[in-house]
Image: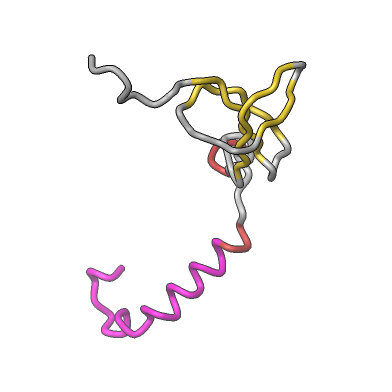
Amino acid sequence: MRADIHPTYSTVLFHDTNADVYFLIGSTIQSSQTREYEGETYPYVTLDISSASHPFYTGEQRQASNEGRVASFNKRFARFNRGGSKAAE
């Protein structure tokens, strides 16, 4: 292995601001911010979404936006189903 080409690997504090959850994870990400957590100071990175707030992991679905997408899709492509083709059914 060549020296001085690898990034520094350290423990980083990630904060999911949507769910207000903190994660301590080993990472090579560089951060100019630091935050104290459980008596130690760590590099600090904020996240908009993580496994604590993502609908796939939490089991929560956002039906309102999905229904809107289906209606938009049907409106856009309704003209292709007018022929009464068996393949479209």
Image position of 18 with respect to 89: above or below:
above
Q: Residue at x 70, y 40 (%)?
A: 19
Front residue of 87/3: it is 3
* Position in image of residue 4 (x %, y %): 32, 22
* Position in image of residue 45 (x %, y %): 60, 37
On-image quarter of the C terminus: bottom left
Give the magenta range: 66-89
Left or right: 83 as drawn, with respect to 60: left
Q: How is the image coloured?
A: secondary structure
Q: Residue at x 34, y 85 (%)?
A: 79
Front residue of 26/68: it is 26
* Position in image of residue 78 (x %, y %): 38, 81
Q: In the figure, residue 67 lies in which quadrant?
A: bottom right
Left or right: 69 as drawn, with respect to 86: right
Q: Main secondary structure of the magenta part?
A: helix
Image position of 56 with respect to 73: above or below:
above
On-image quarter of the N terminus: top left
Q: Residue at x 63, y 41 (%)?
A: 46
Image position of 26 with respect to 60: above or below:
above
- Residue 68 magenta-drawn? yes
Q: Residue at x 54, y 61 (%)?
A: 66
> What is the count of numbered marks?
0
Q: In the figure, residue 53 lies in which quadrant?
A: top right
